[in-house]
Each structure stands twice: as C-alpha cells, then as structure tokens.
C-alpha cells in the first residue's frame, strides 16, 4: 500500500491532514503483515491504527474489546464517517446476531467489534474460519495479563487467534502496560516477533501534586472556591464517601453531585449528563466514572483516597485536560489509606494478592517520593524523563538535593556484579558488608562492591533504593523473585557517569513523620462535623418539604458537633432532641456522626470515643471480639470494655455473641450469694479463674 493512498484515506474518512506520532509507522507494520504492541496514552489515537488498514485492505478487521457499552457508539461513529462496521456482543438478540454474521461473510463490513466472550465461544470459530479476516486488533490488551491492573480471564484464551488465523497480523493496543504486562501480552497472544510502539505518556499540561490527607474536605472546598465554575472530578474509594463529599461541598455552597455504581440507572446517567453539560460543576465519584465519557474541559482531578496502583492513578488523572489546556491534579495521601487498601486486597484472597500489594507499594512510593513526580510516573511506564518537569509540587518546592551519582554507582555496580540475580535486601547486605551465610555461599563477599556502603544504615539504603526505582535506574523483576535489574538509564549512570540527584534519606523520614502525627485539632473536627450535619439537615428538610430549622436548629447541631454523641442515649441528652425527633431523624444523624468520627480517627485525629466506636462497628459487621482484638491489636478485655459501653447505653449488642448462656449462669449463680456491692475478684476466684474478668463484668450487667 503506498502512503499517498493512506494519507488520502485519512483525510477522506477521518478528516485529518497528518498522522500523529507513530500512527503511520504502526499502519505500515500492519500492511507488512507483522504483529505489533502499541502503547499509547488514552486519547493518543490508537483507533486509527487499525481502522485505516481495515478500510484499505480487502476483508474485515476483528476488533476485540471488553468495553461492550462503548461498541455501539464506536460503530455509529464509524458509520458517521462512512465506514462500514458492526458489533457482536450479548446485547444483540439471535436474529440481530445472524444478520451481523451474514454481513461478515458477504464482505459487507470493514470492521467487526466483538466482546472476548463472543470471540471465544464455540459458534464463533467456524465463522472466523470462513470469513476473510485482514487484521485482528486487541483493544485494552493489558487485560490479558494477570500482572496488569485490569485482568480479565477471557482474554487469556485469545492465543487461539494466532493458530486459527496464520498470517493475519495482530495489533495489541493498550494505554497502560508496564514492562511485565508487555511481556505477557506478547507471550499470551503468541505474537510473532512483535514490534513495540511506545508513544510518550507525558501529559505536560497536567500539574501533579500530593498533599497530606488531613481535613480533606476543607482543603478541597478551599481549592474549588478559588476556581469558580471550573469542572472537576473528585475520586473516592467508597460509594458512601462520594455522597458525603458531595454533601459536604454543597453545604459549603459548591455545586457538587455524586456518582457511583450503587445508584439506579436513571440517577446515574442524570448525574453524568449534568456533569458533561456543565450543569453540575464538580462530581464526587467512584473510579468507574469517566470511563467512556469524553469531556475535554475537566480542569482538575482530585484523589480523595490513594489509588490502588499507578496505572489507575494515571488513567484517572488523564481524564482531565484532554483539550490540552492546563489542568490540575491533587492526590491526598495518608498512611491509613495504605493499610485500608492492603486490607481490602488481602481480603480478596486471590492468586494476585502479591502482585496487587507490590503495585500498591509502588503507589505509596510515588506519594511519599521526593523527586520530580513526573519523573517517577514516566519511569514507571518505562520512559526516561531527563529534566525535572517544573510542573509538580516537588519541582515547585524542591527539597535539598545532593549529588548522588557515586552512591547510585555503588548500588548499581553491586547489582551488575551479582549479574542481576539478587533482590533488594541481599544487595543492601552486600553493600553493607554483611557476613550472612547466603552471601558467603554465593561468593558475594568477594565482589568489589562488598562493604562499599558500610557507612549507610540499612533503612537509609532502602530509602535510596526507593529513589533509584522512582528515578527509573533499576527495575524489580517481580516474575523472578524480585531480583533487581538495571534499566538503560541505570546503565548510563553506571557506565557513562550520567549524574543523579538525590535527597537525604533522613530528610525524607523527617518530612514523612510530621503529617502522620496529627495534632488533635478539635476545632477543625467540630467545624467539619457541623458542616456535615447542616448538609444532612438540608437534605432531610428538602425531602420533607419543610424548612431546615424545623428539623433541628443551629444550636442543636452545634451541640451535636461538640459533644459527638455515639449512642441514642447520648443523642437524647442534646438540647432540642426530643423523642419524636429522635424517632424521626435519630438514625440518620447517628450514622453521620459515627461515620464522621471513624473517618477522622482514620485521618489521625483523636476524637473522644472513636476507639470504642471502631470496635462496636466491627462487631456490628459480624467480627467476633477475638477477631476485633486481633485486627486492632488490642486485648480481648479491651474489646469487651468497648462493647460493654454500648451495651450499657442500651444499644443493640447481641449478647449471645459475647458470652455463652452457660458462662452467664455460672457467674450469676456465684454472684447471687455475694452481698452488697459486687466485687469482681471474689467471683473470679470462686469460679477458679475459668471465666475472665471482662465476661464477669458483662454478666453482672444482666443481673440488674
Ligand atoms: P485512543 O483510542 O488512543 O484513546 P482515539 O483513537 O479515540 O484514542 O483518538 C483520540 C482522539 O484523537 C479522537 O478524537 C481522534 O479523532 C483524534 N485523532 C486521532 N488521530 C488523529 C490525527 N491523526 N489527527 C487529528 N486527530 C486525531
Ligand atoms: Zn516535576
């Protein structure tokens, strides 16, 4: 195919005058019948790479895509450009499917979009054999890899394509794939010596910033108020928090809505439409939001919680500034988020737990890293950004750098001398001249760098290795027990003296320690709760068509914000809360106060009663006292103390889960004989210590 024809077609069908970077090369590769892996950021222009050859070559191109909801739009878009295309997926009825299949045979279409389920079904295979296929394009190809962040098991069956369609080129396309995922794609699709096309992932118009996760709502509100009318997305981890954030912002006079998968279809698409059409300025959403919508003027993306990996983070911030104009991104980081995510990942108990934890750790390294954020990001995707970007929080307020070239060379040389066969811990042991048996057995005590980094402590070395990773000088080979490998940039440092800027490990530790030991800013917490209570009041008032003060007046809400009642009994003590209002609104206000208190605790604030509440909530979720004790690293006695508190206040605590009937009777039998004020010790001794104090205390409560 001569390139003049190709250019003409580009103009004729798509109206474009020139190719974007790499498009022409990729298309040429397809014409040559060769396989390729294409890595281009979202919006980079991947579709043209298969659509154009599909139009120009005889036969049809099969496009495999997991995003069923987008197929119809894509196909309609192509028809709008005068390109004949169809799709096959579970949304079609049998008759419609037959029609599409006929179109394929008769050569009436140039592109056929299919879901992976459909492609790998038995009925599809004969079809594939009989039709004339000119190209197979696999979109979202990272889904094939269990190392990737969006693994889909159906994708692993796509290997048959190469056997069934010998000689037909395969184009695997994705916007996110690190080195391991790339290897997986090539191997699992049995690609034939594929060419890798790696477009730059840099999005220089996006600013990058990480902030400590304290008083997030207050920080966000202040940020938005300085940018009136600018559309933005706030990504939250849970459905509930999307609603809370939106409420909190509305209470501060910001036009905010929320979006999550738990809403009904109508509300959800209304929220999406409102946002797209600028009727809603700010939307708090779970990460599903933004997939498949093409709003080009999103001016900021805020991560309320830490994303689970760098791929997701980059994809999500990438939804801002698509028009190329300046856009801002903020990531809130707290250690509590990391441990929460770790818990979630561990609870999933999949084969991929280790992979997911490793990816989360990289995300954490990014958030706590002290070198240019863009360098860290791009190095994760295998790109080597030489100069600092000047558009991130680190560049704007740089830490004290020192020339770390020699330090890096020592470490990199150790990696090279063990022939990249050791993990980080072992390399550090070598650098520190450790006498470990493994080192002696493997002869590593005889290499030149043995002991060359004795003067640096173990934890400092770990910090420096984190920096080497973030700067893209080394890579971890997760597929090979975490062995460290040198990257091309690392080799340049080692062999060509490329210089490396680093930050003192101690300076980083000091910086990180500060935000975590948060002062008890009671005032701030009270104000935050007050605003949330007001938002809830407004919502209830609207629902019932009454003015807000008829729900509760400001003084009542202020007292609630100050006292933070955690039980109905405490709530009733607040001025202005009578029986009727307690009955009508008690639950909603109680839920809000409780979740607010827990959230503040997670953010590092000390709030009275929060630790009691946390045990109680876990108990309500079905954990046993022993499990709660283990999870919270407390004694079981403490957990009982927490639960007893709620029991005494008349909250519903299922006694059967705390003490067996038999134990209860034993205690009560002894207790009856005791006169006057009940002391625990005589009972404990009378029962020969068979029943612990915390259960005795609980049993006695039942006596009253
Ligand atoms: P991706 O699939 O990589 O996310 P698309 O293929 O959807 O990206 O392309 C993103 C946008 O860029 C689309 O609006 C498309 O029309 C436009 N585009 C693609 N190639 C070109 C080009 N050569 N010139 C101008 N616009 C282009
Ligand atoms: Zn920077």
Image: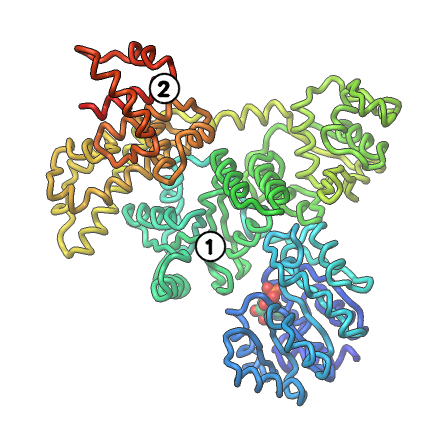
Q: Of the two numbered discs 1 and 2 on the same chain, state the one appearing first in sequence.
A: 1
Q: Is residue 677 above or below residue 365?
A: above
* Left or right of 302, for residue 651: left
663 vs 338: above or below: above
> Which image quadrant for residue 497?
top right
Q: Nearer the viewer, residue 62 or 222?
A: 62
Position of 21 with respect to 578 (left or right) is right
**Dot 1 alpha-carbon crowd within 10 angstroms: few under 14, some 14 to 19, many 20 or more:** many
The answer to whether mark 1 and mark 2 are in CB contact below 8 A is no
Give residue 299's mark.
1
Where residue 66 appears, x then y in whole percent?
58, 65
Percent across and percent down for residue 62 are 66, 75
Please report the residue visible at 76 percent of the width from the left and 42 percent of the height from the top: 480
Rendering coords of residue 596 (x, y %): 32, 38
* Distance from Cα at disc 1 to Cα at disc 2: 62 Å
Per the image, the residue denoted by label 2 is 691
Q: Is mark 1 within 8 Å of ligand 1?
A: no
Classify mark 2 as within 8 Å of ligand 2 or not, answering yes or no. Answer: no
């Amino acid at each position: 195919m001569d390139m003049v024809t190709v250019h003409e077609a580009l103009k004729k069908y798509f109206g474009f005058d020139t190719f974007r970077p790499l498009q022409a090369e990729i298309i040429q590769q397809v014409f040559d019948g060769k396989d390729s892996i294409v890595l281009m950021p979202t919006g980079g222009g991947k579709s043209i790479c298969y659509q154009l050859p599909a139009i120009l070559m005889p036969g049809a191109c099969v496009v495999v895509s997991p995003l069923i909801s987008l197929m119809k739009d894509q196909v309609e878009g192509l028809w709008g450009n005068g390109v004949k295309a169809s799709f096959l997926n579970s949304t079609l009825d049998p008759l419609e499917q037959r029609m599409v299949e006929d179109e394929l045979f008769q050569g009436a279409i140039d592109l056929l979009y299919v879901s992976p389920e459909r492609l790998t079904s038995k009925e599809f295979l004969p079809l594939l054999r009989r039709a004339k296929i000119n190209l197979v394009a696999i979109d979202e190809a990272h889904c094939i890899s269990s190392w990737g962040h969006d693994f889909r098991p159906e994708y692993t069956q796509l290997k048959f394509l190469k056997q069934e369609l010998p000689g037909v080129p395969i184009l695997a396309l994705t916007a996110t794939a690190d080195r391991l995922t790339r290897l997986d794609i090539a191997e699992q699709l049995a690609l034939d010596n594929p060419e890798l096309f790696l477009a730059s992932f840099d999005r220089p118009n996006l600013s990058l910033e990480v902030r400590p996760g304290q008083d997030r709502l207050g920080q966000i509100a202040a940020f938005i108020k300085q940018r009136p009318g600018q559309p933005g997305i706030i990504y939250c981890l849970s459905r509930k928090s999307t609603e809370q954030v939106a409420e909190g912002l509305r209470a501060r006079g910001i036009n905010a809505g929320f979006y999550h998968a738990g809403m009904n279809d109508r509300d959800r698409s209304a929220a999406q439409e409102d946002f797209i059409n600028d009727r809603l300025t700010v939307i708090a959403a779970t990460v599903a939001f933004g997939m498949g919508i093409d709003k080009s003027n999103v001016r900021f993306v805020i991560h309320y919680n830490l994303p689970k990996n760098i791929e997701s983070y980059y994809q999500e911030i990438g939804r801002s500034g698509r028009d190329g104009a300046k856009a801002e991104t903020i990531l809130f980081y707290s250690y509590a988020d990391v441990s929460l995510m770790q818990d979630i990942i561990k609870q999933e108990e999949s084969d991929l737990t280790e992979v997911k934890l490793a990816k989360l750790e990289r995300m954490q390294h990014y958030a706590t890293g002290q070198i240019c954020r863009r360098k860290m990001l791009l190095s994760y995707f295998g790109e080597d950004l030489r100069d600092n970007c000047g558009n991130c929080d680190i560049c704007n307020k740089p830490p004290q750098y020192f020339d770390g070239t020699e330090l890096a060379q020592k470490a990199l040389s150790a990696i090279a001398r063990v022939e990249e066969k050791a993990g980080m811990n072992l390399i550090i042991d070598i650098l520190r001249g450790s006498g470990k048996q493994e080192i002696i057995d493997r002869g590593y005590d005889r290499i030149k760098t043995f002991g060359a980094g004795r003067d640096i402590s173990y934890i400092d070395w770990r910090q420096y290795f984190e920096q080497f990773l973030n700067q893209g000088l080394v890579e971890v080979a997760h597929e090979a027990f975490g062995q460290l490998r040198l990257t091309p940039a690392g080799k340049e440092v080692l062999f060509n003296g490329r210089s490396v800027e680093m930050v003192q490990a101690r300076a980083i530790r000091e910086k990180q320690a500060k935000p975590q030991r948060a002062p008890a800013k009671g005032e701030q917490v009270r104000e935050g709760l007050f605003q949330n209570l007001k938002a809830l009041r407004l919502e209830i008032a609207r629902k019932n068509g009454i003015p807000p003060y008829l729900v509760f007046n400001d003084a009542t809400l202020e007292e609630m914000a100050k006292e933070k009642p955690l039980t109905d009994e405490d709530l009733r003590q607040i001025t202005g809360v009578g029986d009727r209002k307690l009955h009508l609104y008690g639950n909603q206000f109680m839920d809000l106060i409780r979740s607010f208190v827990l959230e503040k605790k997670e953010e590092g604030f000390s709030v009275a009663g929060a630790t009691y509440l946390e045990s109680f909530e876990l108990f309500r979720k079905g954990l046993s006292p022993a499990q709660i004790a283990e999870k919270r690293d407390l004694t079981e006695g403490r957990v009982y103390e927490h639960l007893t508190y709620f029991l005494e206040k008349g909250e519903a605590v299922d006694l059967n889960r705390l003490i067996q009937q038999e134990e209860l009777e034993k205690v009560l039998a002894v207790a009856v004989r005791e006169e006057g004020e009940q002391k625990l010790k005589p009972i404990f001794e009378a029962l020969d210590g068979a029943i612990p104090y915390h259960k005795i205390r609980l049993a006695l409560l039942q006596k009253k």
